[in-house]
Image: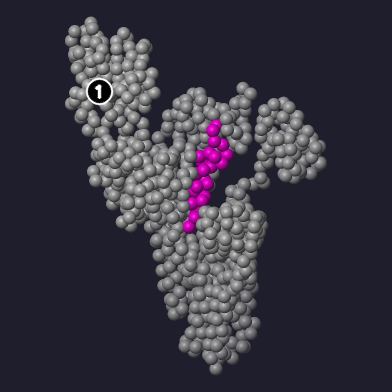
Amino acid sequence: MNKQTFAIKGMHCASCVYTNEKALKSILGVKDAVVNLTTGKATLTSDTPVEKNKIIDAVASVGYQALIENEGTLDEKIKTEKIKELKDLQIKTTVSLILAGLVVWGSFPGLLNTSPDILKNMLNHFFLASIVQFWGAYDFYKATISSLKHRIANMDTLVVIGTTVAYLYSTAVVFYPGFFERLNLKVEPYFDVSTVIIGLILLGRFLEAQAKAGTGEAIKKLIGLQAKTARVIRNKKEIDISIDEVVAGDLIRVRPGEKIPVDGIIVEGESAIDESMVTGESMPASKYKGDTVIGATMNKSGSFIYKATKVGKDTMLAQIIKLVEEAQGSKAPIQRLADIISSYFVPIVIMLAIATFVGWYVFGPSGGLIFAMLNSIAVLIIACPCAMGLATPTAIMVGTGIGAQHGILIKDAESLETAHKIKTIIFDKTGTLTKGQPEVTDIVLIDKARYQKFFDGKQKTLPAGRQGANNLVSSLLNLSASIEKNSEHPLGEAVVNKAQEEKLKLSKVIKFKSITGKGVEGQVDGKKVYVGKLLNDLSIKEADKLKNQGKTVVYVYVEDKLAGLIAIADTVKETAREAIQQLQNLRINVFMITGDNRQTAQAIAHIVGIKKENVLAEVLPEEKEKKVKELKRNNQIVAFVGDGINDAPALASSDVGIAMGTGTDVAIEAAGITLVNKNLMSVVSAIKLSKQTMKTIKLNLFWAFAYNIVLIPVAMMGWISPILASGAMAISSISVITNSLFLKKANI
Amino acid sequence: MDKMIVSIFGVISILFTYWFFFMKKVNTVFATDEVNILVDGGYKPERIAIPYGKTTKLVFHRKDSSSCLEEVVIADFKVRKFLPLNEKTEIEINPTKKGEFDFSCGMGMFHGKLIIA
């Protein structure tokens, strides 16, 4: 009897169970069908396994969805295939190298005397070499034959031609020695050449396959972050279900130490969450009711319930994986030349090998056939198109992968390449350089004595010391916040937030009134309080000072007398100054763009360290794009850093658009680079990553080209033996991959 | 005498190599909704014309065990996909730009072309 279990999506009630069971039982060959509402799973019993499509259709016919797992995900298939490939290669490499070693032992002049007689027999060499030639190099032959059918030549073609020539010549020597004697040639086979070349190239392939697996590690890690199950609350019961079955709107419970399954918003409870695996931000984030949580991040301390908002391919992690995959599929412009060359490379090498043969035969010393053959084999074997083909993609794969681990998502290889050439960078002010939320920065008491009289009639003198002054500040804040609590103005919100931060208990307000264009007023504790614009034209020294710092000042009046000032400003992110300093150290000209007035803009620029002349103030949102284009006019590579939502045209018109801190929506069309976290140092990291990756690519390409340009002529001149050539070839592609893997250690 | 023969034979071989690899004619296959591409020592068909603005399914069937052909890269459409051996892998493309676009194996040794018109 065969049993199949799978999940059914969309069941809510007992009748759903019945309908599904009925539909499943109607499939031909099904003996029994049991559907469980709590687990959302169905079990089919049949004589032979039921086809997947039939189950899906039957469940769909009654309006539900069957989720049948594939025999294996692509990832598992790749893993299985790779393990098999590595194992095969390992066996073939080991056996081929041992056999090659035996042939060398029995034929190499210096070692010949120490070898047993059996190894000195040329016929035995022939047998050993045949195993290496047709079993060890079987895959090379297979690949050569199938590509020749397409009139394409590749690496395998070169290895096959080279080793086959050596093998056939040696075979002829073994079986028809008389023929070679008549030609005045030494009766000497070259089985050592054919076997050692195959052994070393197989070894190269084996090491290359192992190293290459490391280049795609980052994406595997990202996929591995995904939680497998979720504890959802359905029908007031908590059940563990597979992550595929979670739908938007599900309530999910997360306990301490558990992984958050999908994206959502906290509805109950609070916690500290480690989001480093997705955002690259190392400090755990405190999350409260109403805050967004990201799937695949780790809940540290508290227990909470949240509502799923994004599931499946919409989650932030799924979007990140897609972005990284796409970036790894794209090509960097620098690769174009290597691509063109490698598509002509192999046939040209074959032609050069023929020319080498002819050259040595015609112009070489007497007995030129041997030199001609060995040197043309060396040309075929030493040529390494793989190194050229691997130089750029391996570095791009490692580079984009490291980026993702640091919360830097690169859209395509071109953006990664362009970023290293950035000469000018424009930061949008609000929400990028600043936190984007107004905060209370200063509270100033105008007339301490009088102010005190209003609120503390019993006390005749000013309270002494700092503590007393602080109490007065708190009272002023308390009064203002109590009034502002009733207003909806963003500046009012900043005052209320400050009061909450200070844990002040707000008082009750009566006769609240909003005076349009002015401010708000009401009665608090029996006193008339007004918060808003200045009510007369008098200039106040303290207020002017605050305004010069780019702050907005609201005035607090108690009983129609000015009691204090509250300064509110959009505060600068902690990392802004350091990030701008570092960018300037990289010789990048940093600009700031904002719609704010010049005074406010200059004040912020001063705090973060941007030059006065690099402040683009009073720029309307629709003009930002124009400013970017103006800066691009001097052939400068210009990057624009913005929030990705309001700045889309400016991002798109820059050479590299950098969107930052965009919440759980990371697929910003206009941005070449998306920074998942709000840390401005990520901008520096992105540029450093680009520089490091390009450095690696350039070194790889230089190595790959120089290797071929230098060593092919060397082989043509007969200065390198075919065996050494195969060693050099094997090292060449491994060194390129290893160099790309070194990027992982880069300090970004 | 033998040197003469070797020289002539060499020149002919070089010319043959040039003709064999560089002067092959490739037929263009026109595809509408779906096209099967055999991956075995190269891509068959090698030149595929697909319509502009319409989703076309490219079904790669890899029969070649060589690791060279294990990945297909269609860089202009940002696709790098592993092709499991002896399986069909579907890649959907919705071209929004016209022209000739290269597709190749992971190392860029084997090439094919997508023509979008």
Q: Is residue A282 above or below residue A710?
A: above
Give the colouring mode of the picture. one colour
Residue at the spot 62% in from the left edge and 88% down from the top edge:
A178
User: Which residue is nearer to you in this view: A520 or B38?
Assistant: A520
Q: Is residue A131 visible?
A: no
Q: Is residue B14 above or below residue A68?
A: below
Q: Is residue A570 visible?
A: yes
Q: Provide residue B53's location: percent of width, then percent of height.
A: 57, 54
| Callout count | 1
* Magenta stretch: dominant secondary structure: helix
Q: Is residue A234 left or right of residue A454?
A: right
Q: Amino acid at mark 1?
A: Leu
Q: Is residue A369 left or right of residue A655?
A: right
Residue at the spot 22% in from the left edge and 33% down from the top edge:
A548
Q: Is residue A183 above or below residue B113?
A: below
Screen quadrant of the N terminus of chain A: top right
Q: Is residue A454 left or right of residue A317?
A: left
Magenta span includes A350 = no
Q: Which residue bears the numbered disc 1?
A: A534
Span shown in magenta = A308-331
Magenta span includes A318 = yes
Q: Provide residue A551's location: percent of width, then percent of height.
A: 27, 31
